[in-house]
Amino acid sequence: MFPSIEYLEWISGRPESATHDLGSSDLRASVQPGYTPVPGRLADLDDPPSDVSLDEQVADEYGVSPSNVLLTAGASTANVLSMATVLDEYRSPADADTRPQVLVEKPGYEPLRATPAGFGARVDRFLRTPETEYRLDPSRVESALRESARLVAVTNRHNPTGALTGRSALEATAEAVSDAGARLLVDEVYAPFGTVPSEDGAFGGPTAAGLDDVVVTGSLTKFFGFGGLRVGWLVAEESFVDRARSIAFHLPVLAETSVALARRALYNDEALLATQRDHVARNHDLLATFVEDRADLDGVVHPGSTFALVEPTVGDGDAVAEAAWEDGVLVVPGRFFDAPDAVRLSLGHTADDAAAALDAFGTVLDDLA
């Protein structure tokens, strides 16, 4: 039985209903509103040559072969498919101690623990702690691995805190996981978030692609802001991609229109990414200044991040989120990310909209004091 994913059920419909949205983390501000067939930023851009495929474009970005890439209907599908591929080889006995172990970061994104539980895995957690500003610690991962370990799932940037893990820490983590006979899944949808692009990464962010026993997932949703296309991918060694492709027949496929628009986006990615980095710079500065100036908020806004996990002193996460919602402000309760005392703030809209939303949230906090 697949457990319900409470966060996704809770957030459904709220961004559209909110007067001020501090819950959506994708950089959606420059996407044309309404039901238009072509997102505004793509309308006047050129298409690539007809012989250039989307999987070739993604592969080129990661420095791998197209045989290492599998396109999916969004990153969520890529994550589900990655987990299904890893766990497909194993059965789920009734004894929890003998079930395949999936190790997931804490605090963390709820689907990464709910989905493997639905596949019958034993889901354990390892900590990313505020004392280290939620950085990924390979030694914590290694110490939490069991003999039955099959998969370790992490996000980079870390969702919900925005902490960014560099290539060296990813390499150390991958080595520990591989030595234990398991695979590392790195959800990299937030990795490109930053103001200074990485020279050896993918889309300007660090990547774990190419490391042994690693599968990375990504999409055009978060940083590019093209969530309506539902275009994602996974990158892994060819044998894993072949197994995943077979399992993928059980899941939704990409629409041809989405593939065509994604090809256009990646053909013009330098210009699009530069615009999004400016967006990140403005919204990061707004969020960092807001948190720093508020004596009633405790938390770190990591460099280059437009979202953060913060603890209000005027109430727990649920109380603050409920009070904000009553005033038309959407913030996400931290309990969905294993942090009930906190809320996650995300600035995805224009700088003007984000500034107005922060002002409105500041009024909510003042009223709660």
Image (cartoon, grey):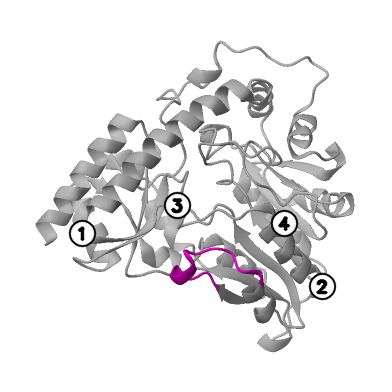
Q: Contact, CB < 8 Å: mark 2 with mark 4?
A: no
Front disc: 1 or 2 = 1
Q: Residue at x 72, y 52 (%)?
A: 208
Indicate which disc, 3 or 2, sits on the residue closer to the N terminus. 2
Indicate which disc, 1 or 2, sits on the residue closer to the N terminus. 2
Q: Is residue 47 depicted above or below 125 in this figure?
A: above
What residue is disc 4 on?
82
Front disc: 2 or 4 = 2
Residue 70: within the magenta? no
Crowding at mark 2 (Cα within 10 Å: few <14, some 14-19, many 20+):
few
The x, y position of residue 239, in whole percent, is 89, 53
Front disc: 3 or 4 = 3
Cα separation between marks 2 and 4: 19 Å
Q: Residue 302 carries which label?
A: 3
Q: Label 2 amino acid? A: Asp
Indicate which disc, 1 or 4, sits on the residue closer to the N terminus. 4
What residue is disc 1 on?
295
Q: Label 4 amino acid? A: Ser
